[in-house]
Amino acid sequence: MTVHSAAAEAGRKPNLFHFTRAPRPMVDRAEGIYLWDRTGRRYIDGSSGAVNVNIGHGNRAVIDAMKRQMNQVCFAYTIHFESEPAVELARGLAARLPNGLERIYFVSGGSEAVEACLKLARQWAVVTGQPKRWKIIGRMPSYHGITVGSLGVTGDDVLTKAFEPMGQPMPLIPAPMVHRDNDNLSLEERGLRYADMLEAKILGEGPESVLAFLMEPIGGAATAALVPPDSYFARIREICDRYGILLIHDEVMTGIGRTGKFLGGDHWNCKPDIISLSKGLSSGYAPLGALAATERIVGPVVAAGGFLHGHTYGGNPVACAAGLAVLGEVDRLGLIGNAAAMGEVLKGELEALTRHFPFVGDVRGKGLLLGAELYADPVTKTPLPPELNANVRLIDLAFERGLIVYSRRVRGGPFSDNFMVAPPLIVTREQIGEIVSVLGDTLEALA
Ligand code: PLP
């Protein structure tokens, strides 16, 4: 594959380094669901970047709003000033969020948002006389971010082990990978079985020490659009309430319309106490994240002197202006409805692909967060041999053909390779045809 790395192009040693070793082409421009590199080669953004460019590339309304804000004021420190974009974005979010999640706190990304959720929960426990509560139960596999705190609740041995004992590895329960189970239970019974693992874990840890349970309503990066059975959600809330434990939903990937509802949890009318947001919140136009929490959580923390947390760039006016304009575009362009409708089309097409490629199985997801697994045998769930590196090959083969897909290996729990297709929410029926056609060629090459 011919790629044109920045350093090679310039004929010098690279200064930048990343978490990937592969050379990448120099990006030149982007519009809608497409990106072009410097050689003029076009790529379909089938993963919306890191599943964040929800409104698509090159949106003029957002760019203009950011320019206007930059002409007015680029930065004012939140300790000194409120800024109108931050106030209005908080208001816009509160109006769209369920369960009284009306108190908003801005940060600059997803890991920062999760980190802030964990710290807000802990400070709430301390100021409400529950200092023994500190454990946040997470799931295996899962991905909640890359900072030391958020890694502590991430279920991915490859990312976490090297950094232990830094941070505090938290207790994890299995993610509800019900499609892998080989038992006589119905899907809904399996959902309850996985939810009840939370109760068992709470009892094992000592309920008085447990502060919160953290989960993605629809599993993203670690589990490729894993949708738990309906029964899972109400039972999880019930268990949290029974033991006075906070429910934190990580909506970094699933939020802002990605799954065909404003939040992933809205498909089940979930009532979390705290949520994290990022990615689609600014759609990649600026680094932005947020937490939203109920007054029950934020009130006592504010009354006790305020949240002991803050970043220089939290609530940055230009980033918030981008977020506010993104919310406007999500409404104006009807992107949540389009995600639901185009998601159905794309899911049907992916299911059709599995009939041609028997090594693709378990197509799943909601809206435009869709995924599938790669198996040697999807009936027995036998994984492909790890040395095939099917996930890396799939990414490379698709990239060579001008399609960007998201593909990873499940790391923790039963092994397999998976992939996600998650194009921008502006995608049209014709463009879905284009994505599926290139994906078909890619799978043909992988077979
Ligand atoms: N939480 C979830 C669910 C994510 O998918 C991600 C990123 O993929 C993060 C947190 C971390 O976000 P960021 O990469 O912006 O730090």
Image (spheres, rainbow, N blue to C red):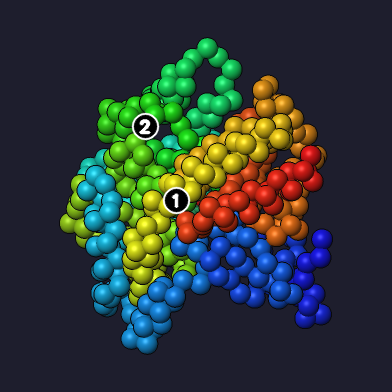
Residue 298 can be seen, yes or no: no
Name the image quarter holding residue 334.
Answer: bottom left
Helix, strand, or loop for circle 1?
A: helix
Q: In this rendered view, identify the residue nearer to me: 417 or 344.
A: 344
Residue at disc 2, CB closer than 8 Å to ligand 1 = no
Which residue is identified by label 2? 233
Q: Amino acid at mark 1?
A: Ala
* Residue farthest toward the top in the current orientation of the protein: 184
Whole-percent x, y for residue 441 in the image? 74, 48
Q: What residue is shown at x 30% (from left), y 65% (from top)?
A: 89
Whole-percent x, y for residue 307 in the image? 29, 59
Estimate the spatial distance between the alpha carbons at disc 2 and disc 1, rounded to whole Å: 22 Å
Q: What residue is shown at x 51% (from left), y 72% (from top)?
A: 58
Which corner quadrant holds the C terminus? top right
Residue 273 falls left or right of residue 182: left
Q: Amino acid at mark 2?
A: Phe
Please count the marks in the image. Answer: 2
Residue 85 can be seen, yes or no: yes
* Residue 225 sits above or below residue 4 on the image: above
Which residue is identified by label 1? 339
Q: In this rendered view, identify the residue nearer to me: 257 or 437.
A: 437
* Residue farthest toward the front in the current orientation of the protein: 430
Helix, strand, or loop for circle 2?
A: helix
* Residue 84 sits above or below residue 222 on the image: below
| Other residues around mark 2 within 10 Å, as few (<14) / some (14–19) / many (≥20) | some
Residue 325 falls left or right of residue 357: left
Whole-percent x, y for residue 278 in the image? 43, 58
Q: What residue is shown at x 44% (from left), y 59% (from top)?
A: 280
| Other residues around mark 1 within 10 Å, as few (<14) / some (14–19) / many (≥20) | many
Whole-percent x, y for residue 106 in the image? 35, 63
